[in-house]
Image (cartoon, helix red, strand yellow):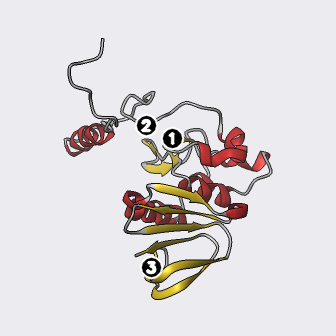
Amino acid sequence: MRPARTPPSSIETQYYAHLDLVRSMQHQGYVYCNEDCGVFGLHRSGPGVAMRLNNLSMWREFITLFDIDAIRKANARPDEVFFKGLAYRMMWSLLWNVQRRELNFTWNEDSEENRPSEWHLALYKAYNAVEKHMKLRKILSDETGVLYSDGSKQVLWSFVPLRLRLDSVSDVRELLSGHVCQTDVLEASKHGIYLIQ
């Protein structure tokens, strides 16, 4: 039977509460390693990354292993896949390797490529800076990029060099380079992330 008062239509994630607990334990000196099955509001199910390559846009809010070997075996470019995945709000997991005391993409490989580069980390930081504005999504024609809006600001993730006509002269900031300009025609570079306001 339905409750007397209808609950809110959206369920807020408990993931941040979980992260607060993890952070607290780390400050106390614990090494915290575990696996979960998505009970904290993030999805962890689905096929391997190779089976998602033709439909990355469908895996919004899913945590996925960035398996470089599987991506290459599927004849895809890892950097392209990494960028597109983040642009579509797919979460690439980062794992803490306790023995080596470093971040890795997967557990089973000890290679330089398995460690996130400065470029990967810069993309995570840029994502964190604009995620709150990534609400309404529009995939641009021929999948040249993806444009998000929250009503007041827009975020463009460009997959290729592209030209985007804006509604009016706007302040545009490219998050990876920090370059700022005012324009009504955005000349976006490949793998650019732009905040438009």
Q: Secondary structure at mark 2?
A: loop
Q: Give, as a three-letter code, the residue at label 2.
A: Leu
How many C-alpha atoms fall within 10 Å of the one at disc 3: few (<14), some, or many (≥20)? some
Q: Give, as a three-letter code, the residue at label 1.
A: Ile
Q: Position of residue 49 (x, y in %)?
A: 65, 41
Q: Which residue is mark 1?
A: 63
Distance, label 1 to label 2, CA atoms, is 7 Å
Q: Quadrant of the C terminus?
A: bottom left
First-in-chain label (1 vs 3): 1
Q: Which residue is mark 2?
A: 42
Q: Residue at x 55, y 39 (%)?
A: 107
Question: Based on the displayed image, in which of its 4 quarters is residue 65 positioned?
Answer: top right
In the rendered structure, are the residues bearing label 1 and label 2 in contact, judged by CB atoms less than 8 Å apart?
yes
Q: Nearer the viewer, mark 1 or mark 3?
A: 3
Q: Residue at x 30, y 11 (%)?
A: 1
Q: 153 left or right of 184? A: left
Query: Quick check: can you spot residue 116?
Result: yes
In the rendered structure, are the residues bearing label 2 and label 3 in contact, judged by CB atoms less than 8 Å apart?
no
Q: 189 left or right of 177? A: right
Distance, label 2 to label 3, CA atoms, is 30 Å
Extreme residue in the top direction? 1
